[in-house]
């Protein structure tokens, strides 16, 4: 099958599966990749966190107690097409010059195709030795559901390093901030708008709670590579009609955290600050920060291997979006991780998303080199 050897053809093949999340429905796409990998000698296991929400863990080689395998990971779900009309077909794998168009071309079916093709090319040589584990997840775009399920249920086994093939234009990033979203709610007592003194106004309570947020301090206010943690009040909903006292107000809060900030503790600190104003706090999305010290020996080797593809040697940087890498790192017991893949970071989630086919080829060759070095073949 040519797509097993050609990462551009495989990307195109993956684009034809509609895996827009919601609803995701990744099963057919996961099985397609599983069949290709099984044909090359991989041991494949499917794990569903919900009906048809299928992640794939594919392994080759590996020993019980020697050097652990290297992990390559990517998600097969995509975001919706958005409100603006596409000028290209989002699912047929339309090409124009070097550009391959489609939802998921950049984020991140190209990255998956690149490591799957590299893995299949080396499969025979990887049967003995540390080997590889490919973790292909469902449900990344909404809170990393697939990766979290794999980590929480201890379905991952071992890995000594992780490459997250998200769109970076083949620049290796050493991590990203964490993501903790909260819903705040105040309750009141409704009354006629002409008699506010008989009711209890949930909007006014929330206004005071939001005011209190301005006094909030994170446990860690600065990180050497990532900079500052942030907080944004994203939405507010309260009241039903102008002539009633509102009895409920909800706010969503988006915090982006740096290493050293524990999300459970962050939630507790918010409860402590907002409780006196009558606001409850519920965590609704939780992706921990991902970070590897740039001085790590393997990270330095990845930097070496990326240098010829870039304008110069990479410098330690973190990326703005969050990934499955954080949950997988936890599930694998904390190995070093880099975010490195062929997609264009500025095109993720965009209308008329595309990926450079030259970069896809480049990634497949780079991933093959990283696999060979890790496994000594
Ligand atoms: Zn992505």
Image (spheres, grey):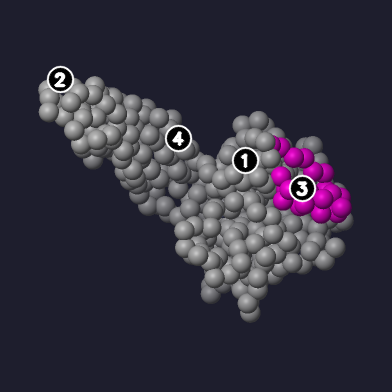
Q: Secondary structure at mark 3?
A: helix
Q: Residue furthest top?
A: 198
Along the line of sight, the residue nearer the viewer: 332 or 184: 184
Q: Are marks 4 and 3 in contact (CB under 8 Å)?
A: no
State the image quarter where residue 199 is shown.
top left
x, y percentage for residue 306? 61, 66
Q: CA distance from mark 2 to mark 4?
A: 33 Å
Q: Is residue 114 above or below residue 43?
A: below
Q: Secondary structure at mark 2?
A: helix
> Does residue 132 appear to the left or right of 286 in the view shown?
right
Q: Residue at x 58, y 70 (%)?
A: 88
- Badge 2 crowding class, 10 Å Cα cut-off, few under 14, some 14 to 19, many 20 or more, is few
x, y percentage for residue 290? 51, 46
Q: Which residue is mark 4?
A: 284
Q: CA distance from mark 3 to mark 1?
A: 15 Å
Q: Which residue is mark 2?
A: 198
Q: Residue at x 71, y 68 (%)?
A: 8
Mark 2 or mark 1: whose residue is earlier in sequence: 1
Q: CA distance from mark 3 to mark 2?
A: 61 Å
Magenta stretch, residue numbers: 27-48
Along the line of sight, the residue nearer the viewer: 312 or 79: 79
Is residue 118 visible in the rendered image? The answer is: no
For discs 2 and 1, the disc positioned in front in the rendered view: 2
x, y percentage for residue 36? 81, 54
Mark 3 or mark 1: whose residue is earlier in sequence: 3
Q: CA distance from mark 1 to mark 4?
A: 16 Å
């Amino acid at each position: 099958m040519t797509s097993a050897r050609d990462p551009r053809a495989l990307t195109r093949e993956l684009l034809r599966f509609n895996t827009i999340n919601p609803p995701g429905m990744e099963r057919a796409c996961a099985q397609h990749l599983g069949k290709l990998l099984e044909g090359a000698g991989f041991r494949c296991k499917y794990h569903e966190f919900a009906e048809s929400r299928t992640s794939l863990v594919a392994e080759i080689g590996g020993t019980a107690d020697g050097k652990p395998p290297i992990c390559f990971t990517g998600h097969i779900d995509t975001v919706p097409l958005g409100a603006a009309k596409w000028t290209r077909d989002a699912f047929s794998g339309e090409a124009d010059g070097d550009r391959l168009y489609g939802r998921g071309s950049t984020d991140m079916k190209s990255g998956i195709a690149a490591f799957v093709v590299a893995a299949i090319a080396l499969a025979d040589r990887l049967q003995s030795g540390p080997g590889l584990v490919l973790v292909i997840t469902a449900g990344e775009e909404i809170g990393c559901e697939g990766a979290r399920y794999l980590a929480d249920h201890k379905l991952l086994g071992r890995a000594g390093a992780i490459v997250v093939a998200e769109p970076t234009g083949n620049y290796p990033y050493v991590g990203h901030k964490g993501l903790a979203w909260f819903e705040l709610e105040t309750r009141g007592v409704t009354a006629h708008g002409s008699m506010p003194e008989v009711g209890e106004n949930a909007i006014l309570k929330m206004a005071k709670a939001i005011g209190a947020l301005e006094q909030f301090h994170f446990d860690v206010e600065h990180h050497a590579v990532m900079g500052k943690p942030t907080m944004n009040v994203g939405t507010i909903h309260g009241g039903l009609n102008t002539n009633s006292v509102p009895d409920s107000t909800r706010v969503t809060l988006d915090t982006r955290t740096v290493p050293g900030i524990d999300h459970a503790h962050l939630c507790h600190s918010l409860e402590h600050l907002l409780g006196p104003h009558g606001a409850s706090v519920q965590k609704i999305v939780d992706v921990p920060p991902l970070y590897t010290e740039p001085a790590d020996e393997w990270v330095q080797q990845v930097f070496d291997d990326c240098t010829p593809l870039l304008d110069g040697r990479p410098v330690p940087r973190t990326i703005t979006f969050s990934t499955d890498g954080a949950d997988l790192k936890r599930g694998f017991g904390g190995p070093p991780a880099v975010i490195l893949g062929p997609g264009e970071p500025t095109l993720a989630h965009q209308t008329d998303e595309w990926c450079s086919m030259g970069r896809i080829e480049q990634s497949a060759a780079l991933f093959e080199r990283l696999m060979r070095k890790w496994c000594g073949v």
